[in-house]
Image (cartoon, rainbow, N blue to C red):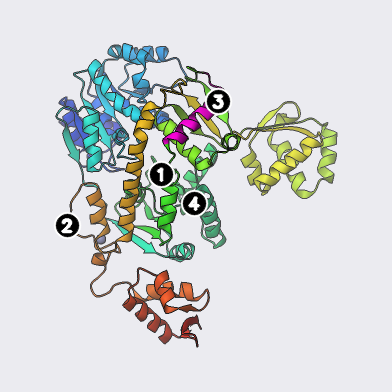
């Protein structure tokens, strides 16, 4: 099989395969159904891309990542593997012609497209020799990102009975693996799994009430490239500000930023101009940066799959790296509320669907391939719905291929200056500084704005003027009233594309059947991660791998579980002292209250810490037997 090695060098510029890659390629080329479980960064896509070069026909790649498909195609083409993706912008008929005669090695398509009647009818013309199912865990309700449309992939089997299927995923618990095999009807699949162990990552779960204080202390002594995961967009902005105001260079990233902002920030971080990326879990997919030395979770994520994937962005170059997750006793209730409290009931899902269809004026049997842009908030207000529940419903509609959801941001603003240039100049001179700044920027940045209505980038103006977004809107509205300019600002932040026609009775059937199971799966996942962070005896690596069905016995000696702490030295006395001081600094506190606030410390550890602080003359006991700062 020197041929494989030659192709590896020719297209990937690599001399050696990563573990299992070669065996997986050979299995495919021998026409076996194949299941490949490789951790993120293990080179999953190569496992079907490389064999595609040796097939005479094409490999059909089913990928759930509609938004990333164009990138995947571009990357494959850049490697010299001729590829195309079926998209929504061109007629399917034309694209099928192109696919049939274009001699593509890889044809990317969504699971929904693979069910299209026209697509199935013309499938035999495409000379498909292999079907690759990317992110195969989407087929299982026990995995993250369940997409019921994945379950229909097995229908391709009937049309192409002799074509082997390769399923690849980076996240597979035993229940998910079983589901993948069953749902894809894999025939005696050859199974490949490399260890998911990331031995160079030191996992630490920190029990603290003062997450921000602790975060600042960490970054005073850490210069490694880092990611801080937060639970909300707002939190990323707050933490970013906190770091920057303490002289620590950071930037933030979340789904509400414009594409340009995302690209700029990612680049600044990748090129080491910025050390810390403060982000929601929207950050990280498809990013391969070798030298990330620290990943912090300010709040634990919804599942161990998420956690594993996120900490896995540290230490890709093999160097020692750290993963710190904060957990405070109050978090448990908050997480249950955040991840389970908002799960919509079947009744609410039905109500929300009907209301959304009415709001968008979709008639019975209509809605396929139509597009809408709307204000999420307006919709919630119109029907007095809880936004979090509506958000959860729209996510379900997206997963169930009823609506495809694209989140947008406040980019839809246009402006035209209708006063004469002379009048404009006069206004500029007499305006207060904040107002004149805005007028100057608009006049300078948009050359044609005196002649025609022009799309303006409000985020850009916010950045250049140093004004807040709301002040900018106020300034623009002010001049609109003065009839100096025209200003249209659409608050649409939700972009939906219809996939299934409206039918109040049937469209939701499958989704409603699945809902109960999805809820149970979510509950189990949250319980697993809560158990993981709460127990502090067993090695974290051992516990994490056990979740992914891998049993190892060797402890990592890096994590902060009791069995991995160095012999004879449990928690360092200085750490205990800092934790106690955090409370004492806020005012006198009784010992039993301290014990409640620091539940992870044993009575002995607490007593030792207090004695140590007294010896250091940092604290004293007052007349009420409370501990006070000195
Ligand atoms: Zn350990």
- Of circles 4 and 3, the one toward us is 3
Classified by dominant secondary structure, the portion drawn in magenta counts as helix
| Ligand 1 located in image quadrant | bottom left
Relative to 207, is 405 above or below?
A: above
The N terminus, quarter of image: top left
> Which label sits on residue 358?
3
Asked which secondary structure carries label 4, the reply is loop
Assess disc 3: are there few (<14), some (14-19) or many (≥20) residues with their C-alpha within 10 Å of its C-alpha.
Answer: few
Assess disc 2: are there few (<14), some (14-19) or many (≥20) residues with their C-alpha within 10 Å of its C-alpha.
Answer: few
Q: Is residue 478 left or right of residue 285?
A: right
Q: In this orientation, which residue lies closer to the viewer: 290 or 196? A: 196
Q: Is residue 320 visible?
A: no
State yes or no: residue 359 in magenta.
Answer: yes
The residue that label 2 is drawn on is 553
- Alpha-carbon span between mark 2 and mark 4: 41 Å
The residue that label 4 is drawn on is 273
- Alpha-carbon span between mark 3 and mark 2: 58 Å
Asked which secondary structure carries label 3, the reply is helix
Relative to 45, is 98 above or below?
A: above
The residue that label 1 is drawn on is 284
- Of circles 2 and 1, the one toward us is 2
Asked which secondary structure carries label 2, the reply is loop
Q: Earlier in the sequence, mark 3 or mark 2?
A: 3
What stretch of residues is rendered in magenta?
346-363
Q: Quadrant of residue 573?
A: bottom left
């Amino acid at each position: 099989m020197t041929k494989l090695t030659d192709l590896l060098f020719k297209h990937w510029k690599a001399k050696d395969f990563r573990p299992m890659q070669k065996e997986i390629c050979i299995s495919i080329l021998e026409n076996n159904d194949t299941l490949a479980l490789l951790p993120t960064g293990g080179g999953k896509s190569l496992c079907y891309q490389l064999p595609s070069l040796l097939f005479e026909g094409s490999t059909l790649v089913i990928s759930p990542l509609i938004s990333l498909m164009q990138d995947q195609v571009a990357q494959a083409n850049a490697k010299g593997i001729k590829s195309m993706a079926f998209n929504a912008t061109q007629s399917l008929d034309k694209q099928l012609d192109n696919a049939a005669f274009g001699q593509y090695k890889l044809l990317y398509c969504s699971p929904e497209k693979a069910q299209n009647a026209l697509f199935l009818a013309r499938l035999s013309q495409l000379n498909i020799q292999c079907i690759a199912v990317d992110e195969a865990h989407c087929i299982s309700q026990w995995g993250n990102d369940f997409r019921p449309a994945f379950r229909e992939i097995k229908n391709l089997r009937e049309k192409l009975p002799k074509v082997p299927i390769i399923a690849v995923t980076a996240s597979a618990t035993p229940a998910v693996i079983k589901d993948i095999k069953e749902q894809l009807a894999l025939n005696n699949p050859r199974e490949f799994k490399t260890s998911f162990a990331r031995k160079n990552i030191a996992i630490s779960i920190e029990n603290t009430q003062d997450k921000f204080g602790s975060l600042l202390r960490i970054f005073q002594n850490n210069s490694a490239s880092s990611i801080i995961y937060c639970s909300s967009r707002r939190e990323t902005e707050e933490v970013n500000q906190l770091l920057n105001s303490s002289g620590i260079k950071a930037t933030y990233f979340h789904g509400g930023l414009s594409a340009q902002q995302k690209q700029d920030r990612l680049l600044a971080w990748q090129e080491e101009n910025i050390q810390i990326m403060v982000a929601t879990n929207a950050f990280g997919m498809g990013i391969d940066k070798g030298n990330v030395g620290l990943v912090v979770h300010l709040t634990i994520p919804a599942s161990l799959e998420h956690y594993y994937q996120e900490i896995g962005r540290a230490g890709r170059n093999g160097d020692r790296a750290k993963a710190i997750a904060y957990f405070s006793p109050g978090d448990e209730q908050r997480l249950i509320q955040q991840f389970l409290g908002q799960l919509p009931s079947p009744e609410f899902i039905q109500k929300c669907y009907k209301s959304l269809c009415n709001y968008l004026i979709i008639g019975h049997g209509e809605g396929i391939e139509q597009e809408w842009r709307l204000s999420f908030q307006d919709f919630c207000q119109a029907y007095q719905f809880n936004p979090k529940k509506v958000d959860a419903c729209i996510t379900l509609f997206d997963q169930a291929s009823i609506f495809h959801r694209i989140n947008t941001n406040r980019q839809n603003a246009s402006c035209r200056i209708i006063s004469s240039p002379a009048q404009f100049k006069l206004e500029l001179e007499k305006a207060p500084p904040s107002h004149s700044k805005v007028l100057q920027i608009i006049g300078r940045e948009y050359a044609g704005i005196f002649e025609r209505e022009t799309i303006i980038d409000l985020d850009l103006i916010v950045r250049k003027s140093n004004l807040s977004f709301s002040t900018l809107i106020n300034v623009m509205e002010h001049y609109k009233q003065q009839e100096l300019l025209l200003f249209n600002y659409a608050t649409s932040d939700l972009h939906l594309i219809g996939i299934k026609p409206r039918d109040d009775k049937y469209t939701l059937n499958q989704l409603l059947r699945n809902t109960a199971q999805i809820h149970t799966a979510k509950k189990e996942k949250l319980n697993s991660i809560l158990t993981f962070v709460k127990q502090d005896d067993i090695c974290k690596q051992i516990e994490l791998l056990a979740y992914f069905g891998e049993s190892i016995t060797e402890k990592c000696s890096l994590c902060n579980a009791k069995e991995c702490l160095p012999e004879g030295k449990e928690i360092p006395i200085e750490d205990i002292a800092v934790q106690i001081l955090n409370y004492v600094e806020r005012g006198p506190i009784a010992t039993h209250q301290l014990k409640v606030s620091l539940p992870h410390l044993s009575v002995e550890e607490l007593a030792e810490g207090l004695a140590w602080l007294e010896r250091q003359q940092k604290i004293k006991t007052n007349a009420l037997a409370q501990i006070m700062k000195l």
